[in-house]
Image (cartoon, rainbow, N blue to C red):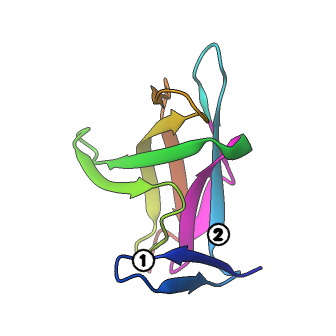
Amino acid sequence: MALSTLVPNGEALTLSAEVQEITLDYHPKTLAVTVNPPKASKKQPICFKGAYGTKVRVIFLSPFGDELLRMADSETRTLSVGGIYPFKCFFTPNGGEEIEGSNGGILDVGPTRP
């Protein structure tokens, strides 16, 4: 299924069915995060979406805990380097306030070697 989204110049950008959607969810009491699927392929376009219509945003972390790249709900980026990438997860339920997941998430991008 092709998806389209509005880009800053006002034109519709069509996303192919090849974009892998990564669904993020959290437990309402513990705020523990689940990532589905937890793996993706190098050179694969991905986007993060929240379960049940919840909006998400993700901040990838360096090995030292520094915040790096930020991705908004449904933003598409192409994975270019394999590895295991930790990230912080933030959820905004419909009509609610933003909540930070207690444990963040991990995305395993393979292959990890050229």
Which quarter of the figure is the C terminus placed in? bottom left
Question: The residue tagged with tag 2: helix, strand or loop?
Answer: strand
The residue shown at (43%, 52%) is 85
Residue located at (42% from left, 77% from top): 7
Which residue does the image show at 26% across and 52% down from the upper left? 68
Q: Is residue 44 above or below residue 84?
A: below
Which of the two residues, 34 or 25, is positioned nearer the viewer here?
A: 25
Between residue 68 and residue 90, name the one nearer to us. 90
Within the image, what quadrant is residue 110 found in?
A: bottom right
Label 2 crowding class (10 Å Cα cut-off): few <14, some 14-19, many 20+? Answer: some
Q: Which residues are magenta?
A: 34-51
Please tell me whether residue 96 is drawn above or below residue 110 in the rendered image: above
Where is residue 52? Give x, y as percent: 73, 42
State the residue position of label 2.
20
Q: Position of residue 100 (x, y in %)?
A: 45, 28
- Report whether 30 appears left or right of 8: right
Is residue 52 magenta-colored? no
Label 1 to label 2: alpha-carbon separation: 19 Å
Relative to 1, is 76 on the left or the right?
A: left
Query: Which mark is nearer the camera, 1 or 2?
Result: 1
Label 1, secondary structure: give it. loop
Q: Residues within 10 Å of mark 1 (few under 14, many from 20)?
A: few
| Amino acid marked by disc 2 | Gln
Q: Quadrant of residue 33?
A: top right
Residue at x 36%, y 47% (from the top left corner) = 59
Q: Which mark is residue 7?
A: 1
Task: Quadrant for the N terminus, please.
Answer: bottom right
> Residue type at mark 1?
Val
